[in-house]
Amino acid sequence: QAHLQESGGASVQAGGSLRLSCEISTYIPSRYCMGWFRQAEGKEREGVATIDQDGDTRYPASVKGRFTASKDNINNTLYLQMNNLQPEDSAMYFCALGSSAACITMQRYYARRVRLEDIIPSFGVWGEGTQVTVSS
């Protein structure tokens, strides 16, 4: 059974940067989709990045150009580099492991053609989250 553990969350000022890590324990399939999601208190969960087994990444317009997902296959760690953070980026950030098809469906979500709640079941393993707080 896969286990994910996020770290790197902190409190920063607007304009600052953070790098989140997601340590992946145990087996992952050869074809997969890994995602970064966030949820602010009282708000719906959002997808902010996906990366597949080939390293292809996708982002919604809200973070494109500021967030970068990457994966270290040797150390089995997923990263999310976040630059120019803004108060609206404040949230609990989660990493998740899903089927390879999930990355394709997430592109439709980023284009606002499907709801995230319809895609969530495609991500079967989730971490517990790490808190990011951005002050103005």
Image: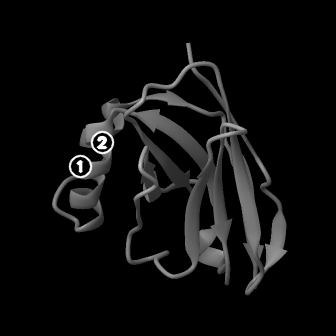
Q: Amino acid at mark 2?
A: Ala
Q: Quadrant of residue 113?
A: bottom left
Helix, strand or loop at label 2? It is helix
Q: Is residue 48 above or below residue 32?
A: below
- Left or right: where does residue 20 sit relative to residue 107? right
Q: Amino acid at mark 1?
A: Thr
Which of the numbered marks, if any, corresponds to residue 102?
2
Q: Quadrant of residue 14?
A: bottom right
Residue drawn at the location 43% of the way across and 56% of the way down: 47
The quadrant the C terminus occupies is bottom right
Alpha carbon distance from label 1 to label 2: 5 Å
Reading the image, the residue beneath label 1 is 105
* Nearest to the observer: residue 113 or residue 50: 50
Residue drawn at the location 41% of the way across and 67% of the way down: 59
Which of the numbered marks, if any, corresponds to residue 72?
none
Q: Residue furthest toward the top?
A: 1
Q: Is residue 122 above or below residue 54?
A: above
- Left or right: where does residue 71 sit relative to residue 97? right
Q: Mark 1: give few (<14), some (14-19) or many (20+) Cα within 10 Å.
A: some
- Give the x, y percent position of residue 4: 64, 31
Q: Quadrant of residue 112?
A: bottom left
Q: Residue furthest toward the left?
A: 113
